[in-house]
Image (spheres, rainbow, N blue to C red):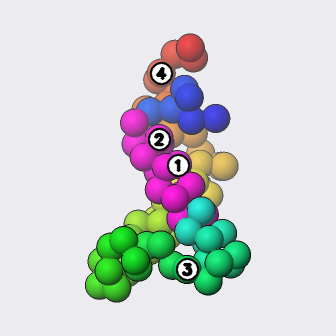
Amino acid sequence: MLKNACTVCKVVGLIAIIGALNWGIMALFHVNMVEQIAGMGMANWIYMLVGLAGIMLLVSFVYVCPACRKMKPA
């Protein structure tokens, strides 16, 4: 899916994957890896980035990224 994406789309996908993995770890083990790695103050910023990445992925279901549209498939 992200193999033929532009750099911005790859970063957005990576942030969303990291956020999803953190949610899974929280559900299974009750451990918040983001807070443990980054600290409580920084965690809020990371959660905002994950939220923005989610919104961007949601929008990408309707609109194709202009940079990805210009790229040739591999």
- Whether pointer 4 and pointer 1 mark residues with C-beta atoms closer than 8 Å, the reply is no
Identify the mark nearer the N-term, 4 or 2: 2
Is 19 included in the stretch rendered in magenta?
A: yes
Q: Secondary structure at mark 3?
A: loop
Look at the magenta stretch and give its main secondary structure: helix
Note whether 28 is above or below 9 in the view shown: below
| Gap between marks 4 and 1 measured at Cα | 17 Å
Type of amino acid under label 1:
Gly
- Whether pointer 2 and pointer 1 mark residues with C-beta atoms closer than 8 Å, the reply is yes
Q: Which mark is residue 71?
A: 4
Q: Nearer the viewer, residue 23 or 48?
A: 23
Percent x, y of residue 4: 54, 26
Q: Nearer the viewer, residue 14 or 21?
A: 21
Note whether 5 is above or below 43 in the view shown: above
Percent x, y of residue 9: 47, 42
Query: In the rendered image, is residue 48 in sight?
Result: no
Is 8 included in the stretch rendered in magenta?
A: yes
Question: In this image, 24 relative to 57: left or right?
Answer: right
